[in-house]
Amino acid sequence: MSGSGFNGSRKALQNESDISEEIESQRGTLGAPVLHVAVVTDVLVNPKILSSEEISDLESSTLTPELVKRAPRNSIVGRIITRNQDHFDSSPRILFPMGIYDAEPVKPGEHVFVFFVDYEVNDQIGYWWRRVPQPMDTDDLNFTHADRKYQHNDGLSTRDKFIGETPPPPDFVNGGDDEEQHTLAGGDSYKKIDKEAKSNKMIIKEAVPRFTKRPGDKVVQGSNGSRIVFGMDRTGAATDPPKKNSPTIDIVVGYGQEGTPTAPVSIENSRGDKETDKTPEKRKKKENVREGDPDFINDKTRVYVSAKTDIDLNMKMLIPGVPPTIGNKPALGVITDQFRVDARQDLKLRSGESAIVMDSSGNIRLVGGRSISLGNANASLGVARLTDKASADPGMLAWISQVTTALTQIAVYVNALVPGSVVPPTGPPADFGSISSASKKVRSE
């Protein structure tokens, strides 16, 4: 705000975006801004993969052609819009990322903060920082079209509302209605960016849930439904009472899936892409207050590391014949559809005195346990009692051999039932009664 009482930001949020005359009158008296704002026209994920033609096009169009081949990964091509600058010079410039190794997501068409070390002395090398936060009815984790903040109404006339017309889908406006109110020079600039940006081929635009964090949490989020929360034990809403001494890291991907209790209200925009509906009340819908909350049942994959949690209760870990572990204790839980562990040399699993050791030569060793059970409480296939030298016990080895043989026969039999199998089944699979008899013999010995 200058001494004359002009406040461009306030006018913008009040939809008074015809500020070009006032900006021009202030241009000679205002110093260089601390932060600029730029519209991203493209993202240079790696200049080394650009074709010679693409490099030539960039060098001929940008204000900083000498930076095209030297720009670090995740640099952007951007047009400065601070103080209506794009109306005076809409040439893009190369802008380096502020965080090369801690890279922020950004997409063509979004607004980002930009700064220069000393703009009045050298405006050639600028750095983009991060996306510009927008009002709640505009900001979107997946893709934010910042100029929607100027659209305060639902786009319907009084007559349309009276006859029950549905508001139009979210659009990609360029500032205000009149040319002097446009954010970018040229009425179709955003449309052109969306069509011509090369990096759009590497982008998926979709409805991504927003996440409500607790005040003390640190959250790292991707723009397509992945996040890491450094917080406390939590399995529901942010307002649920937290537990003391429960530091937790919650890594989750695929949260808030469509049709689940934590999914967002979604809508198809004017470009045909689905997005989270930031103004569902315009369409007589209610926002889902549980949007993005942890959902241990429906979220696609989760790794949960906690110093104090009831992990069996959280994961609904109910195993027939095995009582759940009750109480808040240190735990690590993994929930997914397919779980793989690939150890190149050896794998060791230990709990107290019991352990399983596997190595790359194909050896499997059971160590230190008292017994091995097959089946559940209702249908036990036998229990083998182990000694401290279980790995060398002849009876135990014979029992394991019979189990292995029986399982192999079952596998061959089931495979033979598959249509088109070359080898037809010759009889039923092995009778597990022999395994039970063997296990009784081991126990008697």
Image (spheres, rainbow, N blue to C red):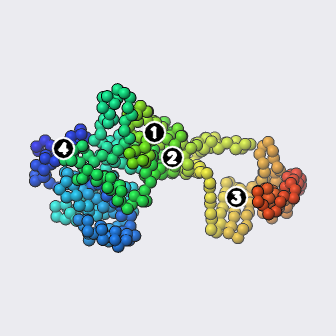
Task: Please give the residue where the numbered disc 2 appears in the rendered image.
Answer: 255
In the rendered image, which quarter contains the N terminus? top left
Q: CA distance from mark 4 to mark 1?
A: 34 Å
Up/down of 310 relative to 370, above or below: above
Q: CA distance from mark 1 to mark 3?
A: 48 Å
Task: Please give the residue where the numbered disc 1 appears in the rendered image.
Answer: 265
Disc 2 crowd rating (10 Å Cα; few below 14, some 14-19, many 20+) is many
| Residue 98, horizontal then vertical, whole percent | 32, 60
Numbered circle sitting on residue 355: 3
Up/down of 197 relative to 230, above or below: below
Label 2: element kind? loop
Residue at x-position 30% and y-position 61%: 77
Task: Please give the residue where the numbered disc 4 appears in the rendered image.
Answer: 18
For discs 2 and 4, the disc positioned in front in the rendered view? 4
Labels 2 and 4 touching (C-beta < 8 A) = no
| Residue 346, horizontal then vertical, whole percent | 65, 66
Q: CA distance from mark 3 to mark 4?
A: 73 Å
Residue at x-position 34% and y-position 29%: 161
Disc 1 crowd rating (10 Å Cα; few below 14, some 14-19, many 20+) is many
The answer to which of marks 1 and 3 sits earlier in the sequence is 1
For discs 2 and 1, the disc positioned in front in the rendered view? 1
Three-letter amino acid code at the position of disc 2: Tyr
